[in-house]
Amino acid sequence: MKVAWAGSRHAVEVADRMACLVASDPVFRKDTRTMLSRKELFKDTLKKAAHAWKRTVELHLTEEEANLLRLYIDQPGYVDLHWVMFVPAIKGQGTEEQQKKWLTMAYKFQIIGTYAQTELGHGSNVQGLETTATFDPSTDEFIMHSPTLTSSKWWPGGLGKTSTHAVVYARLITEGKDYGIHGFIMQLRSLDDHSPLPGITIGDIGGKFGSGAYNSMDNGVMRLDHVRIPRDQMLMRLAQVTREGKYVHSDVPKQLLYGTMVYVRQTIVADASRALSRAVCIAVRYGAIRKQFGSKAGGPETQVLNYKTQQSRLFPFLASAYAFRFVGQWLKWLYTDVTQKLESKDFSTLPEAHACTAGLKSVTTSATADAIEECQKLCGGHGYLNSSGLPELFAVNLPACTYEGDNVVLLLQVARFLMKTVSQVASGKQPVGTTAYMGNIQHLMQCKSVVNTVEDWLNPAAIKEVFEARALRMAVNCAQNISKAPSQEEGFSELSPDLVEAAVAHVQLIIVTKFIEKLQEDILGHGVKEQLQKLCGIYALHLIHNERLGKLYAQVRPNAVALVDAFDYTDHYLGSALGRYDGDVYSALYKEAWKDPLNETVVPDGYQEHLRPLLKQQLKLSRL
Ligand SMILES: CCCCCCCC/C=C\CCCCCCCC(=O)SCCNC(=O)CCNC(=O)[C@H](O)C(C)(C)COP(=O)(O)OP(=O)(O)OC[C@H]1O[C@@H](n2cnc3c(N)ncnc32)[C@H](O)[C@@H]1OP(=O)(O)O
Ligand SMILES: Cc1cc2nc3c(=O)[nH]c(=O)nc-3n(C[C@H](O)[C@H](O)[C@H](O)COP(=O)(O)OP(=O)(O)OC[C@H]3O[C@@H](n4cnc5c(N)ncnc54)[C@H](O)[C@@H]3O)c2cc1C
């Protein structure tokens, strides 16, 4: 099962090696992270990132190994933005010459970069950004400027205190005309003493949800006061400004400006499956240890994992973790395929790639945030302790519903794509890829489910048809209602809640389909495929048919712990007293409690000042 989860034997081996490297290095300790002040936590992040880089160089780690090392360190920081956004933005939007110049420095960490798009006033509406880049032909430079308070860059990770450079998104103005949003490489801080360059005001935007968690990241604010940069620091793969100031657009679609976001959304699906699997791992393992109430008087107490209510809340998450993992692996393939097509100037699959990455990012991160919260409840009181690992896991993954595109905004993008596809089908065009099912419109609009018995629900063809019919009927229903509105735009706006639901149904169909396709592959190991078939059934059916699932849950229960062991997480990475591999939960919880700074003294700070006078006063009152 570890191989099925990781994707290959090689993937299991590398992940194991990197996880153990991190777990055995004292610099990467994280058990007291939630007790650090913001300043201490930030410094700890700098230390870990520098140490990770040192180890990467010393051990000559490959890119795959270095990425895993960063993942298992498990502490958000500026390096994430550098590798996940800054480098890909230059790769996707820079010319070959620009890539050579900037990536050479970025790959050696001679510069640290971030992705500065969002502003105080606009995040979702990228076309509404206000920062300006005005070309000055007299000096062959762009003047980068924040004209209003709301144009302040706001949120970019690593911007606050660390980044030396950024890809900054700004409105390109030349020859008096506004050509809209484009990307520019800017140096922000001196490479000698790290002070901001003239005209740049920069800082951290402040503490965030939860303790520890995302507070390790210096999300930043930046204002630009007529800062000049050379013309060749505009990213010029999609469009160029000539020496004379002429704007020239390349023959590539302008949506490629959003390409970095497509790339990152795809990686976020993998992050979501990982976060969900960690929460499930903690809740399942703990559920096997925690006992509450006896079955008969004097008999042994019941493992809480044996309660049917516990199973019906928890096993859909276990199934979702596997479902998201497999769809994430497929999405990575889709992204690679689209990138290869783009390189040979075939842009036909771009809209589908956008819809798939946006939709899957949205559905998987929303489900993951909800599930982590529920896992906390599934662990009872102990789940609420920081030492369970769940509060931090929740706080770190909650913003994934917002960053890289608000989840509702992204689902509306999927809905727009679906409405276009429905109208193309109506005019006789055969849809392809993940919308191919819409071509089967005659049948799917009328068909009745072939399901008669409980067992029929486990037939993959039946499940798939149910999901196809549901998604198509919801999309067609929306399209029909939009066509009755005074205008397309008004109809879309009025029906947006229904459109979001239709988009979710389409995305869930993709997830179910990819799980079913995974089961058609050769899967090694005795009983592994059978377990995955049960999980696939649970994932699909819990979305539509909750009542009949009890039997499947009972079949999964004997292997539940093994199914989370297959995620192959070290105790260090899981970071949870409740989810420990050895099950020694109570001594771990007890030991963790003593690490709290409040326990440094027996009598707390503040006793003399506040507690004692209060108690003395009560003493006086009682004497009265
Ligand atoms: C302790 C644990 C440790 C864990 C470790 C952590 C691991 C770290 C891993 C990872 C780190 C990641 C850290 C996170 C970092 C976060 C970074 C950010 O947040 S960066 C900002 C993102 N900002 C957004 O995403 C804005 C969202 N808004 C948009 O994307 C757009 O503005 C949008 C789509 C909402 C509207 O776009 P329009 O204003 O141009 O309007 P329209 O008309 O809708 O679109 C025009 C056309 O372009 C297409 N389009 C839109 N987006 C596209 C795209 N991306 N690709 C292709 N086409 C696209 C559309 O389909 C439409 O096409 P037609 O004209 O209908 O054919
Ligand atoms: C932890 C974190 C890290 C981040 N890192 C970066 C970074 O490195 N670089 C960067 O540039 N940005 C970053 N961001 C910013 C992030 O990308 C934006 O917050 C995100 O795109 C959402 O935009 P917004 O904040 O403007 O939300 P808004 O768009 O203001 O959303 C507010 C509400 O309005 C709703 N809404 C908005 N538009 C519509 C619509 N058309 N129809 C229906 N409902 C709508 C949304 O659903 C939401 O409920 C980060 C954000 C966070 C939280």
Image (cartoon, grey):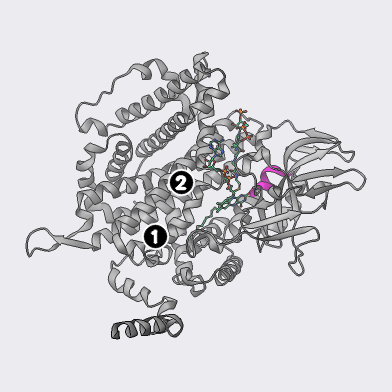
- Give x and y (percent) for residue 79: 60, 59
Report the magenta residues as a range.
Answer: 88-94
Q: Name the residue nearer the viewer: 485 or 372.
A: 485
The dominant secondary structure in magenta is helix
Residue 61 % position (x, y): 57, 62
Q: Which residue reaches farthest top?
A: 427
Q: Quadrant of the C terminus?
A: bottom left
In the image, what residue occupies the spot 43% across and 24% down? 437
- Magenta includes 92? yes
Residue drawn at x 77%, y 35% as measured from the top left: 179
Mark 2 highlights which residue? 365
Looking at the image, residue 163 lies above or below residue 123? below
Horizontal side of residue 303 vs 90, given as left or right: left
Q: Tell me the CA gap for discs 1 and 2.
A: 16 Å
Q: Which residue is mark 1?
A: 390
Residue 417 visible in the current orientation: no
